[in-house]
Image (cartoon, rainbow, N blue to C red):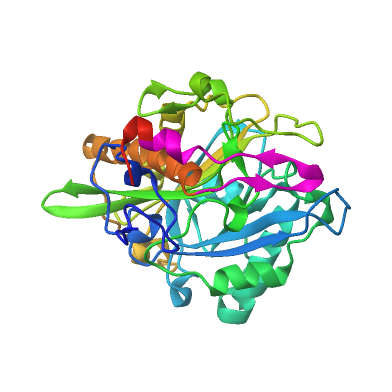
Amino acid sequence: MSKNPHLTTPSGKPRARSFGIAFDGRPGQFNAITDVAGVSVGYTTLIEGEGALSVGKGPVRTGVTAILPRPVAELATPVFAGMFSQNGNGELSGSHIIEETGAFNFPITITNTHSCGVSRDGTLRWMHKVLPAALDSAWGLPVAGETYDGFLNDINGHHLTFEHVSAALDNATSGALEEGSVGGGTGMITFGFKAGSGTASRTVAWQGRDHVLGVFVQANFGKRHNFSIRGRRVGKELAEPAVREGTPRAEKGSIIAVVATDAPLLPHQMKRLARRIPLGIAMTGGFAYHSSGDIFLAFSTANPGAAKAPSGRLASADFIPDTDIDPFFDAVVQGVEEAILNALIANEDMTGRDGNFVPALPKGWLAAQFGKL
């Protein structure tokens, strides 16, 4: 198995490019959100128990993902940001202050729907431990997102704890990332296949300098018949293997997507990037159905001095003109599409509560259609 991070995850799980699937754009070193300098990602994954649901006991198929937008010592420094809700059947805490000021600070966490508050509050507890000065004379409004994993997980058992959140934050690293059924993506489903956490990146040249734009998704959306790979509608020919239900499955899909870049862009431009995320989702066949929470965040690590400018002084920020922003739109769409496919491909079958079964996207079929490992 190749150790090329564009082809496999650190544990050897295949990524989309390992099957010869051709993508647009130029990826970064690891083809991950962590290609943006200073950004790190950590996971806590909880997989325990088998058989019938016993609320409070399991089976457990859940977790939490932590995304740190800056190194730990710099987490109190805001990042310029923008968010967009394509379909608001979901939650992204901290979104109101982002809309108001065009910035946020502290880590981002993503988990299951009924643990979003735990991950938010756990972030505040962790920040008070590692950087107490950040909370000594100010409030904190961490960003926390969620998608629903109740088909596989004992979601009402509330198995995620503050300690699990702290562990994900402590373990956040740069470099190549695991994908699939890890962290907050552990119990997630996309197009009726096992999905979850996925990432990708693109390099954008502007005025002689390369900028990096990275994407992270927690994918849990879509109907099988709409599934597309690189413009080819494949869902109907993939009617099998099918989801098997011990308990009826309600349509409760969502996707949280985070875009990070080192390009100097202003808050209104970050919002413009967030508004392009749905175009990448549509490339895979996601159409933002009624029950889907499709909520997106974009941030820039540039201009730290402007983001934390003290009172009483004129602040200044560099920014790429709006007239030159189109290549960054391309990068968002390209990165989101690939991150979703990575979340599907770096995965295996999973059985959860009540024997509910979700198949992985068949690797043999992929190899036959697009190439071989």
Query: Taking 306 as reference, is 354 above or below it?
Result: above
Query: Taking 177 as reference, is 51 above or below it?
Result: above
* Residue at 27% from the left image edge and 59% from the top image edge: 29
Q: Which quadrant of the structure image shows residue 174? A: bottom left
Q: Between 86 and 157, which is closer to the camera in this rendering?
A: 157
Q: Which quadrant of the structure image shows residue 35? A: bottom left
Q: Between 235 and 65, which is closer to the camera in this rendering?
A: 235
Can residue 264 be seen by looking at this rendering? no
Can residue 45 be seen by looking at this rendering? yes
Relative side of 96 to 198, left or right: right
Q: Which residue is situated farthest in the left direction here?
A: 208
Q: Between 229 and 99, which is closer to the camera in this rendering?
A: 229
x, y percentage for residue 261? 34, 53
* Residue at 45% from the left image edge and 40% from the top image edge: 363
* Residue at 36% from the left image edge and 30% from the top image edge: 369
Total marks placed:
0
Q: Which residues are magenta?
A: 347-367
Query: Magenta stretch containing residue 6, yes or no?
Result: no
